[in-house]
Amino acid sequence: MKLKKLNTVFAVFLAFLIATLDLNAKTANADSDSSESDLPVVTLGKSLTASQRQNTIKVLTQPLNGQSYQTITVTGNDLVRYLNPSGDNFTTSSGVWSSAMIQKQPKGTGINVHILNYQGQNNITTITEDQYKNAAITAGISDANIYVTSATRIDGSGALAGVYASYAKNGGNALNQKQVNAAQDEMNTLSGITQQNKGKKGYSDAQLNNAVAGAKKEMAQQGQNISDSQIGQIVNNQIRINHLGNTINNNQKQQIIKVLESVRDSGALKNSNFKEQASQLSNSFQKDAKKLYDKVNTPKNRNLFQKIVQDVINFFSSIFTKK
């Protein structure tokens, strides 16, 4: 009887031991997976040569200062999946050169984008840092540093597709496809408007992106049920605030309204994280604008302006005095 009880106790203990080891193994694997998912991800275009690939990695990982990272290769399949729904016409055999690195940051950091030179030259010809920022927030990305570069001169639209792909790798389908589609549509639209207004007095890409970020912030405050007419009013208000009334024509304004309607229809406004990120981006743009104003509005420049005004007054005074 005692032996039987002893065997039973031993069996229970053994079962407990096995369960504990199994639990520890699962926990270790979970920790390993979690650790890997937190590593920065370098996305590399499939069309890069071996030399270009190594140089691209070197450029993108320089900000890491030796920190570990993981890599994924972006192919034509990724371009088809992420870019075609917004109107592009890529095929599975399309080339990919523009590359990116995404580095997760602590909550509240916001989205920061840096276009890095490749061997001393900026090869991203069309998409701007501000456009990447706005698109990333629409897609549902939050609190991250994003670095973009290209070994060849290219518009740069494929780089963000790599970022989308990196989220899919680490989170299954972490990003909502409708939001991704809206993000790409937004980036293409804003890029097109900037190209159309290139060189125009009173226009800058920063003003446009500040207007869009401000509109998103207002939309997020009003919520998912915001109407088309309310979005139109918000856009008109942001165009006025950002002094774009003399450069943005009615067709371009309607494009912006349509993009923001797509953002609403994607379900982005339901996400409290979108509201936080949109607010942070809008505030960031405003701070940058203030820094630029402060840089120009120095006592030296004010004194120079006053001197010019006084010189003009003296000039006309002298004319009337002579008469």
Image (spheres, rainbow, N blue to C red):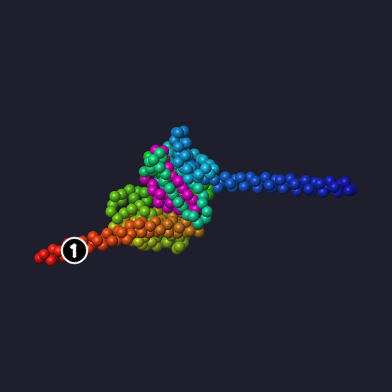
Query: Is residue 236 left or right of 169 when viewed as pictured?
Result: left
Which residue is depicted at the point 52% across and 55% down? 107
Q: Position of residue 133 (x, y in %)?
A: 43, 51
Which residue is depicted at the point 26% across and 62% down? 306
Which residue is depicted at the point 35% across and 48% down? 192
Q: Position of residue 221 (x, y in %)?
A: 45, 62
Which residue is depicted at the point 81% across and 46% down? 10
| Extent of the magenta region | 126-152
Q: Is residue 145 something one can see in this rendering?
A: yes
Task: Farthest residue to the left: give it.
Answer: 323
Q: Is residue 261 something one can see in this rendering?
A: no
For label 1, the crowd category at 10 Å Cα-Cα, with few meaning under 14, some 14 to 19 and many 20 or more, is few
Taking 181 as reference, is 45 above or below it?
Answer: above
Q: Secondary structure at mark 1?
A: helix
Please state which of residues 257 and 146 is positioned toward the viewer in this rendering: 146
User: How many numbered marks have been drawn onto this rendered protein structure?
Assistant: 1
Q: Write down the quadrant of residue 88 in the picture.
A: top left
Please state which of residues 199 and 96 is positioned toward the viewer in this rendering: 199
For the C terminus, the quadrant is bottom left
Q: Position of residue 244 (x, y in %)?
A: 32, 57
Query: Is residue 123 left or right of 4 when viewed as pictured?
Result: left
Q: Which residue is mark 1?
A: 314
Task: Farthest residue to the top: give it.
Answer: 50
Please state which of residues 131 and 224 is positioned toward the viewer in this rendering: 131
- Is 164 within the magenta? no
